[in-house]
Amino acid sequence: MELENKVVIITGAGSGIGAATAVLLGAQGATIMVSDIDLKKAQKVVDSIKAKGGNALAIQANVTEFEEVESLISRTVKEQGKLDVMVNNAGIGGRHQKKTAEHTHDDWHNVIAVNQTGVFYCMKVALQQMMKQGHGNIINVASLAGLKPSGYNLSYSASKYAVVGMTKSAALEYGSKNIRINAVCPGYTDSALLDRLLSSRPDMGDTLKRLIPMDRFGEATEIAEAIAWLASDNSKYVTGQTITIDGGTSLQ
Ligand SMILES: NC(=O)c1ccc[n+]([C@@H]2O[C@H](COP(=O)([O-])OP(=O)(O)OC[C@H]3O[C@@H](n4cnc5c(N)ncnc54)[C@H](O)[C@@H]3O)[C@@H](O)[C@H]2O)c1
């Protein structure tokens, strides 16, 4: 199997893209540490991986708390001996769709804490372990909103541009250390996060679909497929890249 013997941590893996990635990588033979701030949701994902004969463990961690990130990674290494792949997927959207002058302080601080600082914490601690073991692979879940402007969600856009920047900067530093760092940039993808955006305005679904040449939202499994490729040795000469999976939305 493609990911046999690989130990993978996925943050925010209790739902949506993270859950789909956990299930796919688990089916490809990896041992998955299914991490989420919500342990119950993580445990359900573990159950479905195990039901298909895979190997997985649920670990609660809030990525905004540095000590929790440290214990997530140290527990993984203690129990599995190594960390091959770190998928930094946990992310939230802002609660309000407002122009920049009305953007709330709460949205700013919450979104930056999870989407940007959380990714920094996870990269920092994962890289320390990967340097020790002499190899590693980090995959950050950024967004189309980190590649092109999207109005009415300043903190989300800022955080995702930051994730793309952190991915490329760190890839420069660690290329010679046998550690690859890439990002995926999903467009609008069916998930709880998208549901919250769609419920902000009755016409939001149609408005967004008009932006998508393929005329539909993405599925979480379609993002998971790109993450699986980056996690595998099939992409072993790829680092510092963003892979856009958006049904063509970035074309316009
Ligand atoms: N759905 C989309 O349209 C879309 C598009 C582009 C990028 N993304 C990105 O994909 C990633 C996954 O989003 P999704 O759409 O699957 O959303 P989702 O809401 O379905 O899943 C996010 C998961 O992250 C967890 N989480 C939230 N805060 C956390 C924290 N502080 N620590 C640990 N876990 C936390 C949640 O409990 C949830 O299980 C996010 O980074 C998001 O920004 C999503």
Image: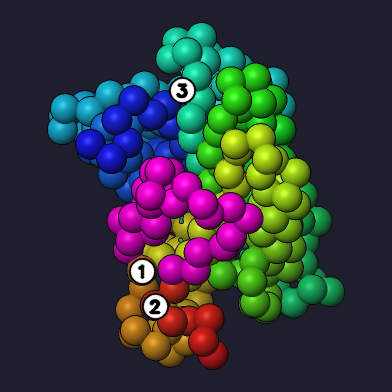
Q: Are marks 3 and 2 in contact (CB under 8 Å)?
A: no
SS at mark 2 in the image: loop
Figure quadrant of the N terminus:
top left
Q: Which residue is mark 2?
A: 247
Label 2 to label 1, Cα distance in Å?
7 Å
Label 3 to label 1, Cα distance in Å?
28 Å
On whether residue 235 falls in the magenta region, the answer is yes
Q: Is residue 193 left or right of residue 2?
A: right
Indicate the position of residue 194 as horizontal and vertical percent values.
45, 64
What amino acid is found at the position of numbered circle 1 in the picture? Gly
Q: In this picture, which residue range is highlighted in magenta?
A: 219-245
Q: Which residue is mark 3?
A: 59
Indicate the position of residue 119 as horizontal and vertical percent values.
66, 43
Q: Residue at x 33, y 61 (%)?
A: 222
Crowdedness of circle 1 by 10 Å Cα count: few (<14), some, many (20+)?
some
Q: Is residue 182 left or right of residue 12?
A: right
Q: Which residue is mark 1?
A: 218
Mark 3 and mark 1 lie on one chain; the one further toward the N terminus is 3
Quarter holding residue 103? bottom right
Indicate the position of residue 183 as horizontal and vertical percent values.
56, 55
Which mark is nearer the camera, 3 or 2? 2
Q: Are marks 2 and 1 in contact (CB under 8 Å)?
A: yes
